[in-house]
Amino acid sequence: MAGKFEDLKELQAMLDRGEITQAEYAMIKADLLAEETSAKDLVTPTSTDVGQVPQPTPPAIGESSGMTDQTRYFLIGTGVLMAIGSFMPWGQAGIFTVSGTQGDGVLTLIAGVIIAIIGIARRATAAAGIAVIVLAGGSGLIVLNIVAGFADTPGLIGTGLYVVGLAALFALIAGFKTIGERSRS
């Protein structure tokens, strides 16, 4: 029994050093516990295997992985804020206000809804990240264009522009984070 214990210790050490994968470890451990063979007999590195570190297999093209909950909630939240900000006043003069949906706010509304849907879908694909970046960047450019038009009279800028602008900025960050999660998976 002491021999099996030492073999299991050696097997765990091989796993910790990255010489074998988790699947190989599980298979060898099961064989070791089932029979009276040693781990050294089951996995003997050849001269070509010595010194080579196993590389992770990249996901297949089109294969997606789930995103972290933090990124997911970030996308949903920024998408919802962009949509809400699109309905808020984008311009105001005294008691008169102009809603964002009376102009380009329709585009930011659609962008916000799509970003929220991407967050709900929980897919950290490169395409999802790029879509979020394009939608958030486009919405941010719309806001900057309108704010630049009000440069002479900043008091006319409505709160909806601020909400959409900040949400677009944070959605842009979340888009890059989604691509980063895709590259780590």
Image (tube, rainbow, N blue to C red):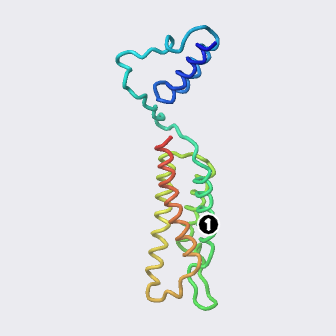
The front one of 140 and 58 is 58
Local SS, label 1: helix
Q: Residue at the front extreme?
A: 2
Categorize mark 1 by other alpha carbons within 10 Å: few (<14), some (14-19), many (20+): many
Q: Residue furthest left?
A: 48
Is 44 situated left or right of 170 in this image? left
The answer to which image quadrant residue 98 occupies is: bottom right
Residue that appears at 58% across and 89% down = 93
Which residue is rendered at x = 48% and y = 15% of the image?
Answer: 43
**Vertical order, 180 against 101 (above or below):** above
Residue positioned 48% across, 49% down in the render: 179
Return the x and y of residue 143 as percentages of the image width and height.
Answer: 49, 73
Is 114 drawn above or below residue 183 in the view shown?
Answer: below
Closest to the observer: 11 or 123?
A: 11
Lateral position of residue 59 relative to residue 97, left or right: left
Where does residue 78 sit, x and y in percent of width and height?
59, 62
Outermost residue on the top side: it is 36
Report the amino acid beneath label 1. Answer: Leu
Q: Give me the residue at 46% from left, 25% from top.
A: 19
Q: Above or below — where is 8 with respect to 117?
A: above
Quadrant containing the N terminus in the rendered view: top right
Residue position marked by numbered label 1 in the rendering = 81
Residue 3 screen position, x and y as percent:
58, 13
Residue 153, horizontal then vertical, whole percent: 48, 89
Number of callouts in the render? 1
